[in-house]
Amino acid sequence: AQRVTQPEKLLSVFKGAPVELKCNYSYSGSPELFWYVQYSRQRLQLLLRHISRESIKGFTADLNKGETSFHLKKPFAQEEDSAMYYCALLTQGGSEKLVFGKGTKLTVNP
Amino acid sequence: DSGVTQTPKHLITATGQRVTLRCSPRSGDLSVYWYQQSLDQGLQFLIQYYNGEERAKGNILERFSAQQFPDLHSELNLSSLELGDSALYFCASSDRSSGRNEQFFGPGTRLTVL
């Protein structure tokens, strides 16, 4: 079964503190994972793809196949990082749908 | 705006009614996806079209249907609406030929069924 789990519904940190948003997945094939961000009243935007290994807005995420995890990290959180974050798994083999986690609402306090 | 567009932004209707949501993909994208976002179910994949043909179905009810037209825009038709159909409906598009598998999302249509 394809499943993405984000165990934290809410996460609150202070500005300048490190932040880690957890994501675990279950998928029998070779996973392709993404992090999407949704700022208040805006559309979903792609933040990271695990294949590209990019760092966007200071965020990074490493795919750990042994632990089936794709946690999102940032060493120093900023207030503008406050948003909903969704981890997503792309299924392959004809049906290229995104399977989303329930999302984590990150609040960065001043 | 060359991104994904969706109309209308908001839709308020009554139970039993039928509505049509419209999506225009990014220029050049042949794939269109529909997702439903609700408080209890989160983001759920409904259906995918590629160049006018249905490619994949997810948790889409029989009361719902979609199509993609020759100009690549897509419509999602929701009929016999129930209170539980109230949700945010997103459309996304991608360019599979690029190999990037990245889906770009529209702003969504917020449907309220009263």
Image (cartoon, helix red, strand yellow):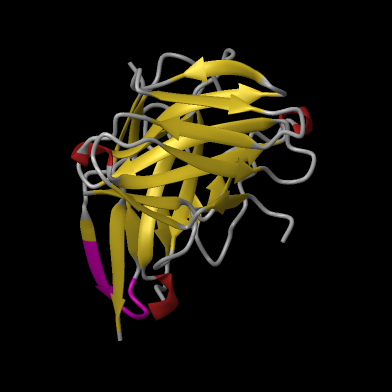
Between A64 and B19, the one lying in front of the other is B19
**Is B63 placed above or below B21 here?**
above
Total marks in image: 0
Residue B23 location, x and y as percent? 59, 43
Query: In which quarter of the view is residue A51 placed?
Result: top right
Query: In which quarter of the view is residue B38 placed?
Result: top left
**Is B42 placed above or below B65 here?**
below
Residue located 23% across and 39% down the image: B15
Q: Is residue A15 magenta?
A: yes
Residue located 47% across and 44% down the image: B90
The residue segment tinted magenta is A11-17
Residue located 23% across and 62% down the image: A11
Residue B100 location, x and y as percent? 69, 36
Between B67 and A30, the one lying in front of the other is B67
Quadrant that contains the N terminus of chain B: bottom right
Residue A99 is left or right of residue B83, and the answer is right
Residue B82 location, x and y as percent? 22, 35
Q: Is residue A107 magenta?
A: no
Q: Is residue A65 visible?
A: yes
Q: Is residue B102 visible?
A: no
Query: In which quarter of the view is residue A95 placed?
Result: top right
